[in-house]
Amino acid sequence: MNKVRIAIIGAGASGCFCAVNIKEELPFSDIYVFERQDKPMQKLLLTGGGRCNITNTFENIKSFATIYPRSNKLMRSLFYKFNNEDLIRWFENKGLKLYAQEDKRVFPVSNSSKEVADTLYREMIHNGVKIITNTTVRKIEKENEKFILTTEDKDCKKWEFDKVVVCSGSFTENLSGKMLSPLSLNIVQPVASLFSFNVDNNWCKKLMGLSVENVSLKIAGTKFKSSGSLLFTHCGISGPVVLKLSSFAARFLYEKNYQTKILINWCNDKTDEQIRDIILNIANIHSQKLVTNYRIENISSKHWEYFLEKANIPFTFRWSSLTPKHINRLVSLLSCDVYDVVGKSNFKEEFVTCGGVDIKNIDVESLESKQHKGLFFAGEVLDIDAITGGFNLQAAWTTAFVVAKSIIEKEKI
Ligand SMILES: Cc1cc2nc3c(=O)[nH]c(=O)nc-3n(C[C@H](O)[C@H](O)[C@H](O)COP(=O)(O)OP(=O)(O)OC[C@H]3O[C@@H](n4cnc5c(N)ncnc54)[C@H](O)[C@@H]3O)c2cc1C
């Protein structure tokens, strides 16, 4: 068997996972992983707030379209080759113990992303993968059947390889864009996904830290909506319901320069009439009590005061004093509270890029470029991204494994 030379660009989750999987099956291959930073897997260390939400049990997932806003059909088909259970088995076979939280997110038992990175690093070293740090790949060119990589170091060194796997992650720094430009690939414009909304509302500061369960959110005039829990932050709103909406509407929000109106139903899927019935019921039963003393279930006292103030209802009023106008205002605030989004903030625990190498450029079975045989892509560099919950890393593991298997199969023929 020939000694195949393979370059992997990027020592992140997908690059390191791909390297180990190839080298285990092709021990005589020469594998170089290029990393522009001084250490591999720097982003992996930050994942899950340092705990690494490595994957998800997928037990609550009805369809891939609900978790992967882009390329969900591709992800579904790749799952037949390598899914979350394969991943859990893979890491447990290497001695990394994992557990699933009640919300189905999976973490290492140590709750330490360093343990995940250490496991991958140890396997790379053990199998003889060469890790070249502090080295940025600037250019990939194809000459005859070989790939020539130009790296940015003192003398702009050129390297020759038989195969190249691009695992360079997010496009936000435009590094990947520059590096790939000689290959004339179609790139889906990269934009941010998974962010919190900055809103023009002084109440957010007052309610900062308050979490509200079962809220539904809609972008006015669009079909984008999501439901879940919401968290007030110092400059706006965040939490699963906001992050999910930011993911599905990532491109729309970018085009609107993150300025839009959102409509919040604080009683999730309840209609105006249902909310009105609940309010009238409280007004009937507790007519002589102060409006601050009785409120709708699920709404905290602090939050209820916000509704009363916004509806111009004095805190000293008794329920019996509410006029039909007051009731109407309360119903409309609870079912359709309007917020002006005026910008976005990074959600510190996780953010990704929507966009990247267009999957139309790629053979969906092998993740090999259709134009340039021997060139493969894995991880976030592809136009694949997910909502939070371990699904982004799972996409990195799955695509990296599929690339590794494709290369192994071709080399074993
Ligand atoms: C703060 C944070 C927390 C997150 N937490 C989670 C989580 O808990 N669960 C989850 O599922 N997802 C999480 N994500 C998303 C997840 O980290 C990514 O989806 C995942 O890291 C993608 O892996 P990757 O290998 O494609 O890219 P990366 O991990 O970004 O790795 C790419 C590597 O390539 C290197 N590189 C880039 N260009 C070049 C070049 N030209 N030459 C050499 N090297 C290059 C980069 O330096 C980098 O090390 C989080 C993201 C962030 C930012």
Image (tube, rainbow, N blue to C red):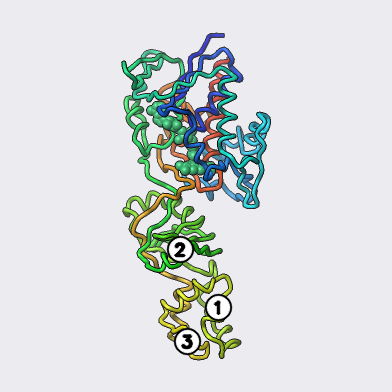
Q: Can residue 379 be seen in this view?
A: no
Residue at the spot 57% in from the left edge and 83% down from the top edge? 282
Res 316 label: 3
Judging depth in this view, the residue of 4 and 93 nearest the camera is 93
Residue at the spot 59% in from the left edge and 34% down from the top edge? 115
Residue 335 vertical placement versus 393 (above, below) = below
Residue matched to label 1:
295
Cβ at disc 2 under 8 Å from ligand 1? no
Residue 148 vertical placement versus 311 (above, below) = above
Residue 246 vertical placement versus 277 (above, below) = above
The amino acid type found where label 3 is placed reads: Thr
Circle 3 Cα neighbour tier, 10 Å, few/some/many (<14 / 14–19 / ≥20): few
Counting from the top left corner in percent of width and height, residue 221 is at 38, 63
Residue at the spot 37% in from the left edge and 25% down from the top edge? 136
Quadrant occupied by the C terminus: top right
Q: Is residue 33 left or right of residue 274?
A: left
Residue matched to label 2:
208
Viewer-nearest of discs 3 and 1: 3
